[in-house]
Structure formats: structure tokens, C-alpha cells
Image (tube, helix red, strand yellow):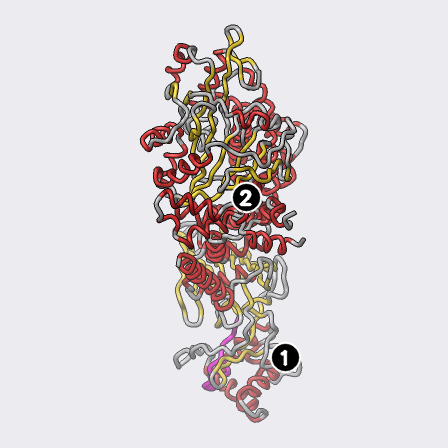
Amino acid sequence: MRNLHVYLLAAALAAIGLGLTAYKAIVVGLPLQAKASISAWEVESEIRVAAGGGPLKLSSFVPEDSQEYSVLDHRVAAPDFGVTVAPEGANRRLNLTARSGSGLMAARQRFIVHRNNVRAPDRRQVPPFPQEITLSQTAQSIARTLYVSAHGKSSDETSLVSVLLHDLTSPDRSENVRYLLGEVRSPQRVATLAAQILRVNGLFARAVHGVDVSKTGISVETKTWLEVHVGDHWQSFSVATGEPRIPRGYFAWWRGDAPFATVSGGKLDRQRIGITRVEQTVLRHALALGKHEGAFLTNFSLYSLPATQRAVFRVIMSVPIGIFVLVVLRNLVGLRGVGTFMPVLIALSFRDTHLLWGLVLFSLALSAGLLVRLYFDHLKLLLVARLGAIVMFVILFLAAVTVLSDKLNFEPGLSVALFPLVILTMTIERVSVIWDESGPAEAIRLAVLSLIIAAFCYVLMAARPVQHIFFAFPEMVLVLMALTLLIGRYTGYRLSELVRFRALAEPRP
Amino acid sequence: MTPWAIAHRLHDVGLLGMNARNGDYILPCNPRKLYPLVDDKLLTKELAARAGLATPELYAAFRFSGEIRQARALLDKYENFVVKPANGSRGNGILVIKGRVGDNLRLANHRILTWDDLRFHMQNILSGIYSLGGQEDSVLVEYCVEFDRVFENITHLGVPDIRLIAYKGVPVMGMLRLPTSESEGKANLHQGAIGAGIDLATGRTLTAVWRNSIVTQHPDTLANVSGVAIPHFDRMLEIAAGCNGMTGLGYVGVDLVLDRTKGPLMLELNARPGLNIQIANRAGLAARLEVVDRADAGLLPPAERIAFAKEKFNAQNV
């Protein structure tokens, strides 16, 4: 009956743990491995203005998510300005204002761009008609002429736009094109004009500006292309080729005829956009997307903690695996060390000192402490006073080792933190008590065994994949708990008992 | 043999493992709150006195450091005595005083101890060095057992004792523990004492085990340790059978000594008796515990429980 209860409880815990893990791995997309990485870029824009002394207004654009790209961690760094963001047509306007400015003032935007592995057509809404038309009456009639000409040479809207762009960019341009474009033939100018021509003729069209994230550099040029609403979606057209497609790396930043930065009350000194490629883990990607979609599980995960607490929990979440190892060693194998969970604590303190140096330091301090204990034995000191004196000696010993290793420029010695020190003194106390109770041989045997178990626990607890699993999927602890419960009702033989009672297994003489 | 085959053989023998002892017998049968009754030897003595069981006479008990100054005044009149921590385990912290050398005390192992040394030892006991959890302890000083002459040839220095395991009022297994020079007079198997299984029907020793191997002779005296008849064994079975009811513990180890003038005395009880007794008897405890449970032998009157044990757990019927 008791066993059935334990089995049911263990099954329930394991089911919850594995279920949540599977859900988070498959649906939310948290990776089971820490290392998997994905394409991402860090984009930084800088606008520098020479302030005129009076009120200053600076305006730019904030990028938005699209089907193909996600924008994460967007930050505006403009310490001298008041910052507001407001939607404006298809864009989000970034307004930076200052009551009075002098000298050079800079405003920066920084964000991470992730490429999503989907290429779905952009079905964003069409802006309400009528669209803004800035062409003069003459220009409008020329625009109609150009449109009719392109219309005659095309079969549908897509090919019409391609033909129009071709007409606008071909070297042997007509008089009409020359009238509208003048001598300037930059892609911005062409895209803006093409959009105007199409709008005059009743189509929805706009120029799109952005960057090519595949071309990284400290200062990259902006790209401009054309978007036309064809059928039920916005279709992008490359200005240079007229083709209804744009290179993969084109990331849209703002739409319309406006320049990237406009300034009033000062003079634009410099504008620059830089792109660097960053290795983003799938994990961060999934978390970032989760944040965007408001996924409950990622918002309430350990990842939502501040960085310092995250670091602490990365360590804490590795403790259950160490404890589980200890339970297995004790109840299934039959090995025990000093204290119940002391080896796990020792393993934790190895995190600060690293394994090899930790082992050396522990052995040294332990031997030193026990030697002193041996000497104190002659003085007939009472228990607590004697332990106190031993612990004080160990602290002095550690201080000496640390100072010495600093003088010798021996790096690892310095990594003795508060935590290992506490664990070390506690271990010496325990070993010392065992020495009193069961003699030196038993004390040394248990101490060495504890160190071996601790080293084993450390290797498991510090393993990146293990840490990742228990940090990303804390519910895996429930699975460990289920296994621990099962071991708690295991009444079979321990491995060590097979050796201990070996004589009983031999046939009677 | 493969580990798997060994495990199977051990299971067939009915060996009780540590996990099964803890999970199937100690946890269900021995409520934690009763442990102090057996862990504190002073409490056990009181309990035994009330139940009419003989224990070594208590000469003095010290609970506070201040009282230790009077140790000599209280104890000088006794030629022999034993100093023990009330909450000690595995025989640690026990001093056996046998006579005097001038102004000093003589230990059973012929070492000399000053009264100052003794007082320091008592202070150590009070501060909890030998107690199970390391908590404050008290010192008890009691009659030094003069063991029966039967054991004279098969013991070295210390006092041999008899461990009986009683389950629900039925003695299920017994072992005679004989100190050796290696165990320094202690009767604990893991410290090097000899353990000899006992035929519960006849009270004769069976095979003996020393450091995990089967022996027939005492390593120090070379006398035969098998086939020794233990006097007053029936009285010992009676004492053991009464200990479950006395303490409320369903599974208990009873340690007895045989004094040459006072007969069997109960030394102490153990709520977590060790498993080595199985090696000494070359028999499994689990099998015997199941026999008791199957027959509901725990419900019989005391005399019948002992008869049951004698019938089931003898040399012919292992």
C-alpha cells in the first residue's frame, strides 16, 4: 500500500516534470542543448547634430518586427534628449527633443535583429486612400503617361511595376523620365518617384528604407526598395533590377519618402549605421520570441530574473543532481562520506576554486587542520574550544596560502572565496569529530572518500549540458525527485552488501 | 560469481540488507520518539529497573561539569568500575577501571590513568564527543562486570557480551561477541572482535566470524570458540523477549553480559542493531523476521514466544 502510494506519487511527479519539459522544448522552442546558435545581428545607429543653441528637435525611426525579422532588445541612448516614440503611418517615429543644446549632441539606437526562419508574404494593412501625392500637376500628367506606357508593355501588376522601374533606371531614359528624376539617379530617388507614379495611378506603393544585414561594417549604407500592394499582400521590388524580390539580408527600417534623420534647431553633423554579427543562442532567441508573444512559461522562468540572481540560480539548480548522486551512492551503492550532504557542498565550493586546485587546497588544509588537532590532543582541551582553535588555524592557513600564491603570481590560489572557506572549516570540524569518535583511520578514509564523491559530483554539476537542462527546465528536478522517492522505497541490497555478506552467498561447507 | 548471482543467493538465504532493515523494520516498528529510551543508557537503566530486569549497578551519574570535581570522592571506594557516556555509540568513550597503582587508576588494558585524566575524559563525554548527534551528554559510572568463567579462555582483555535481536517480543537471532587484542577489549565486530552465532534452542555457539572470515579458534588464546554452551541462556531469551514491550520498539538489539555472581545483566539496547550478526550465524535475518510475521508469533504470551523461537531458530532449522 505504502509502495503503491510512492509509485503513484513518483509517476505523477515524473509525468509533470517530463510533460512541462517536453512542452517547453517542443512548443516554446527552448533548446535542449545550450550551444545551438542562430543568425543574429547587432545594429547600431548614431545621429550626431551640431546644436544651434535653441530648442532642438531630432527625429528618426524605430524599426519594427516583420514576418522575416524580429527586433529585440531595442534601446535608445540619448542622454541629452527627451525620448518619445509614436506611430506615424507605416512607421514608428522616434522623437528626440531638448530645450537647449550646444555643441555636438549624439543619439544612438541599438538593437538585435534575428532572422526568423519563415518567409511569409507581408499581409499588413493597406493605408487608407487617398495617399499623399507630392508631385506637381505637370509631373502628375507625365507620371500618367509613363504608367500607361508601362501598362502597355506588361501583363499584370507585378510585371507593370518591373517594367516601370526598368524604364526609370535604364541608361537611355526618355525625356519624361529625365524631367521627373533630373540628373539624380540614386535608388532612394528612383524608389520614391516610382511610388509616386504608382500612387497617381491609383496603386498602393511606397519606398522602403533599411539596411542589408549581410553586409556588416562600422558604417554601412542604407538600402532602398519599393513596396507595392499586389493582390492581397505587399510585394517588394528591387530598384536596381526591377525584379519582384529583394536580397535576403534586406531589413526594413522605415517606409515613405522621409529621410532617416530630420533635425530642426540644429544641423545634422553625421549619421551612421553599423552592423555586427553576433552569435545568439537558440535559447536566447526562443526566450526573446517568448517575450514578444507573451508566453507565460518563459516570462515566469528563471531567465526572467536579474543577471545576478540568474547566476546564483544556475548554481542552485545544479545542487539537486549532486544530491541525487549522493542518494544513489548511499542507498544503492552503499558509499558514505563525511556528513549527509557535505560532498555536495564541497563540490559547490570547487566551482570557485576549480577541481584540481580545489582538491589540492582541500587536502592541504584538511591535513594541516588534522595535524594541529593531533598536537592539541596533548593539551587536553575541551571539545568546542579545541574545534574553535582548529578552525582559526585553518583560516590563518588559507590566508597564508592566498597571500603566498598572490606573491608568486599563482592565479588559482586567489580564487578562494568565502563559501569554500566555510565549507572547508565545516569539513575539518566533521572529520575531527569522526577522528575522536572512530579513530584516525576511519576519519581519513571518510575524508578521502568524501573528496572523491565531491569530485564526482562536481564533474556532473559543472557539466554545461546538465546545468543548462536544470536551469532551462527546472521542472526536471521533479523527475529527479520522483527517482529519489523510488530509491527511498528500495529495500533491496546495496552493492557494498554483496561484498560484505559475500560469505553467506557461498554454499555451506 | 556475478554480482547478480550473489544478490540472488543472498536473497535465497534471506539476508536482511541495510535498506530493508531501515525501510521495512526500523521505520515502521521503531517510532523515532522512542529512541531516547535506548540511546540514553541512564533512561534504559531506569526502564529496566521498573520492568524488573537486572542491569549493572549504577555507582554515579554526572550531568554537569561542576559535579566532576567530586568524582574521586564518590568513586574511590570502588576497586573496579566502568565509565561510560550515557549516549555513546559503538562502545566509544568507555573506560574500564580495574584497581589502582599507587595513587593512580589502572585500566583493564594495564595502562595507567591519573584522576586528572579521568576527569578530563568525563569532561569530554559531557561536551558530547561520544554522543550520537554530538549534543551534550552525561557520564554514568557503573559496576564492572566480572564475566563468567566459561568465557575465560575465549576472550582477551574486555568483557564478552551477548547480542540478541528481538522482533515483536520474539528473539530471532543471537551472537556471542568476544573481544580480541585487536579490538582493544571492545566487543564490536567492526573493531576486530569475534562474533559467534548462537543456536537459540541450545544456547551453544555455532560458527564464528572474525574480520569477515570464518574462524573456529580465538586468535589470541587459540581456544575453540564454537560449541561453547552459554549458561543462563534461557534467562537471556526471557530478558530479550521482554524488551520490545518494555520500550515500545518492535525491532531491537539487546546487549547482555553474564556476570559470574549476578547472572545475566542487560547492558544496553539498540534501536538500530547491526547486520553483522547474520555473518556470525551464517543465516539471514529477513527469513526469520518473515517467519515471525507469518505466524503472528508476536501475539503469543512470553513463554510461548520463546518456545516458538527455540523451535524455529535452531541449528537444525536455519
Answer few, some or many: residues within 10 Å of disc 2's Cα (few below 14, many 20 plus, some between 14 and 19): many
Residue under pointer 2: B278
Residue A83 position (above or below residue A177): above
Residue B262 location, quadrant? top left
The mark found on residue A483 in the picture is none
The picture places residue A299, in percent across and down from the top left corner, at 42, 59
Q: Are marks 1 and 2 in contact (CB under 8 Å)?
A: no
Residue A167 position (above or below residue B50): below
Q: Secondary structure at mark 2?
A: helix
- Of the pair A397 and A47, the residue shown nearer to us: A397
The stretch drawn in magenta includes residue B99: no
- Of the pair A455 and B309, the residue shown nearer to us: B309
- Of the pair B255 and B182, the residue shown nearer to us: B255
The picture places residue B309, in percent across and down from the top left corner, at 45, 45
Q: Quadrant of the N terminus of chain A?
A: bottom left
The picture places residue B103, in percent across and down from the top left corner, at 50, 6
Residue A260 position (above or below residue B180): below
Total numbered badges shown on the rendered structure: 2
Residue under pointer 1: A241
The picture places residue A269, in percent across and down from the top left corner, at 54, 55
Query: At 41% across and 72% down in the image, what residue appears?
Result: A89
Q: Amino acid at mark 2?
A: Gln
Tag in front: 1 or 2: 2
Q: Is residue B282 visible?
A: yes
Q: Are marks 1 and 2 on the same chain?
A: no
Disc 1 to disc 2, how far (Cα)? Answer: 92 Å
Q: Amino acid at mark 1?
A: Thr
Which contiguous range is marked in magenta?
A: A196-209
